[in-house]
Image (cartoon, grey):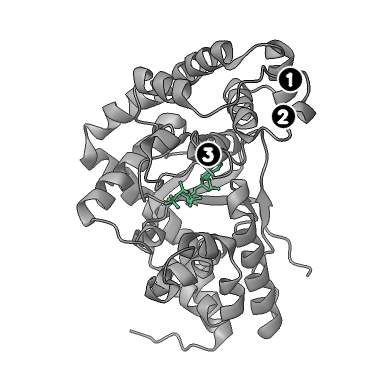
Amino acid sequence: MSTSFTPRIFSGIQPSGGLTLGNYLGALKRFVQKQDEGIETIYCLVDLHAITVWQDPERLRHQTREAAAGFIAAGIDPKRSILFNQSQVPGHAQLAWIFNCVARMGWMGRMTQWKDKTAGKNAEAESLGLFAYPSLMAADILLYHATHVPVGEDQKQHLELTRDIAIKFNHDYKVDFFPITEPVIEGAATRVMSLRDGSKKMSKSDPSDQSRINLTDDADTIAQKFRKARTDAEPLPETLAGLKDRPEARNLVNIYAALADMSPEAVLADYAGKGFGAFKPALADLAVAKLSPITAEMSRLMADPAEIDRTLGEGADRADAIAQPILARAMEITGMIRSRR
Ligand code: AQP
């Protein structure tokens, strides 16, 4: 591989529910950092991914606008970054079809997210879109020749599949066209866990609202959820090794560290020997201090949905302008005639 690609960040979040603290710490907070580092950043509300499981249309529209408000409230500047909803740039679905013909069924079947989402269910009754989800995700990224993708730990396998698709496309068509994208998984909270079960990730579609902090939760709700968060009876240890078999305690320490921009070791240095009776209120205060300005700004932005739609429309135009020539070239490489009209 000899082509060098200009550094460009792409990442997305599904508007399949309200944004959670997991989305904020694992993705959004880092999206803002990347934007502020001055790299070209493209952020997408992946509504085509959201409908791989049933979404009520009115709720989906609301959640998409609310997620856009969340991005802006958290610090994404739609002038410096490109912010849009996926369905408005047709190239995502078009390139995904080409990738459906490059990727193999076996690759999809091995994805742990597919296995998790179908566990205990009849997989045959799930949508074809849910199975093919990683191929659309590869298209999302490669449609912009993105070189880096900041994500949480749960998306690592999908990123590896994106690389496999790029490698196979380049190999099959004897080109050096798609970059081999690097995942960027960094920080103390790459995997924020459920507040009710330290073995499950915090998720917007978890049936229990107590399992997560939503970016729309008010201060009392945040405090109450942390107070009720599952923990153990031991005080906090002096070192990270002491958290080894204590997933719930480790999760709360990691959340504190990520919110305070500290290392988990530094959090333990402050709280070693203290019980959760002291730690949970401190964590709740910190979370409220960090999240409530975002919640308030989201609510202000949501009062003008037409303005959000305008912002997303401008973002889609800018995204489309980057995507069009890349898609056209991908089609040319695969042997499609560009008809003259
Ligand atoms: N718990 C988490 N900890 C750290 N990062 C997380 N992310 C999601 N949950 C956590 C990161 O957020 C980005 C967007 O994820 P997504 O919304 O596209 O899909 P997801 O990972 O499937 O998130 P959810 O909340 O679990 O959605 P549902 O419930 O609809 O499936 C990604 O970068 C992800 O890593």
**Residue count near mark 1 (Cα–Cα under 10 Å), binned few <14, some 14–19, many ≥20:** some
- What is the count of numbered marks? 3
Q: Do the CB atoms of the residues marked 3 and 1 lie less than 8 Å apart?
A: no
Distance CA(mark 3)–CA(mark 1)? 20 Å
Give the residue drawn at x 32%, y 51%: 313
| Image-quadrant location for residue 261 | top right
| Mark closer to the chain start, 2 or 3 | 3
Which percent across, then down, holds residue 25?
A: 55, 34
Give the residue drawn at x 50%, y 33%: 195
Q: Which residue is mark 2?
A: 243
Q: Which residue is mark 3?
A: 197
Which percent across, then down, holds residue 72?
A: 40, 34
Residue 237's label in the rendered image is: 1
Q: Do the CB atoms of the residues marked 2 and 1 lie less than 8 Å apart?
A: yes
Residue type, numbered disc 3: Asp
| Mark closer to the chain start, 2 or 1 | 1
Residue type, numbered disc 2: Leu
Q: Residue furthest front?
A: 233
Distance CA(mark 2)–CA(mark 1)? 7 Å
